[in-house]
Amino acid sequence: MQEAIKNGCFVLPSGEKILALHHYAFEDGMGESYCAKLDTGCMLMAVRDDAKITCYKKSFQGGSKHNAEEPLHESYFSTLAAFSRQKKRSKAVTIKIKIFSCVAFFVTLSGVIFLFSTRGDSEVVYRGQTKEEAFYYVASLIKYLPEFKTMPYTVSLPEQKDFEEVYQTPALLEKKAELLRKIFYEEVYDASKFDATLEILRQTEDVVKQALKKLAILEKNWGFKIKKRYDIVLTVYGTGGEYRWEDPAVGTVLVKADTRKTVRGYTKTILHEMVHIGIQETIVNKYNLSHWETERLVDLICSTYLKDLLPEYGMQKSADTKIDEFISEEAIVKNLPAAIERFVAQYPRDGQTIQ
Ligand SMILES: [Zn+2]
């Protein structure tokens, strides 16, 4: 990007002029940031965190509130650095530097802290289910067996005669729970079953981390939830993939071992469930989306926004496609809640109030 000086002002390619610039350097030398006030009332933030550069613009309303932040090309950083150097070289600066208000300073600081805290560096842990988790999971699958029968899923369960009796009559579960637990711990559960699949599963880590970096942009733009840690838990039971979103710090993705599945197949399952975790509170619960509306939305996010990481993503056939016309890649990136608001306005939720 070429910076230009017109009438003593630095002019950005957007035509905006830099009125004032603040530079913050972090003590460890690993990062620095620039915050520029522009003549359009916008603030331009450029942050170097070690080798990574992030630039974005905020526009202000009423001095303190801001609306959309636009991600910008990282060359904006070098323009601001050049402006800063020029400012230091010449004391006879023609630009009148205005002192930033406290509000602007705190917004800047919070912006920097925010960027440092959302670098897609969540911890990703791969492990097999413990015997306690596995038994609890099998029991919950048995409880939901009548519902699974109405859905196009195949449910894997222990092949053991005492368990098979309960599959026929799920009401027996409570009566036989302690006996089943003993049988499960002593005869059924075998942690060594996980070893080979865990090897394959761990090969998804690079792509999973790349996806988290992309999803962090959605977190910044509209509140997609990124957890501090993701547990990728291998099971030999269930339907294929499941997720747990309730823990504020940990997202759990349950993945069923499948000998036909490749690294790509597991990657698809893991990212699909991570997208579920990310939209559960801010979208699915808030707007009361149905199961198949949710599945379609997750499929659309995976097949458009994450398509570079999931090039062969297959859409679920049973999903509800009414939502499609409201969802574009732009809507996913910039403001998915606004798109969903338009969807539920067109297809109101029965007897439910949207908060
Ligand atoms: Zn799903």
Image (tube, helix red, strand yellow):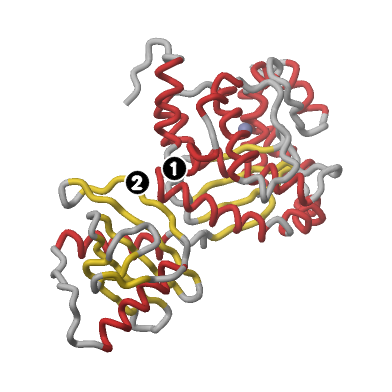
Residue labelled with disc 2:
68
Query: Within the image, what quadrant is residue 259 found in?
Result: top right
Q: Nearer the viewer, residue 95 or 117?
A: 95
Residue 134 left/right relative to 63 = right
Residue 347 point in image, percent of width and height: 46, 15
The residue tagged 1 is 334
Q: Does the residue labelled 2 lie within 8 Å of ligand 1?
A: no
Q: Is residue 265 left or right of residue 126?
A: right
Residue 58 screen position, x and y as percent: 31, 54
Q: Which mark sits nearer the N-terminus, 2 or 1? A: 2
Q: What residue is shown at x 16% (from left), y 66% (from top)?
A: 100
Q: Which mark is drawn over residue 157?
A: none
Residue furthest out toward the front: 7
- At 42% from the left and 47% from the top, the residue drawn is 248
Amino acid type, mark 1: Lys
Pick the residue in front: 66 or 16.
Answer: 16
Residue 219 can be seen, yes or no = yes
Note whether 206 is above or below 333 in the view shown.
below
Ligand 1's quadrant: top right
**Residue 109 at least partly seen:** no
Q: Tell me the crowding category of disc 1: few under 14, some 14 to 19, or many 20 or more residues within 10 angstroms, Cα based.
A: many
The picture places residue 122, in percent across and down from the top left corner, at 52, 59
Q: Are marks 2 and 1 in contact (CB under 8 Å)?
A: yes
Which residue is the extreme one toward the right?
260
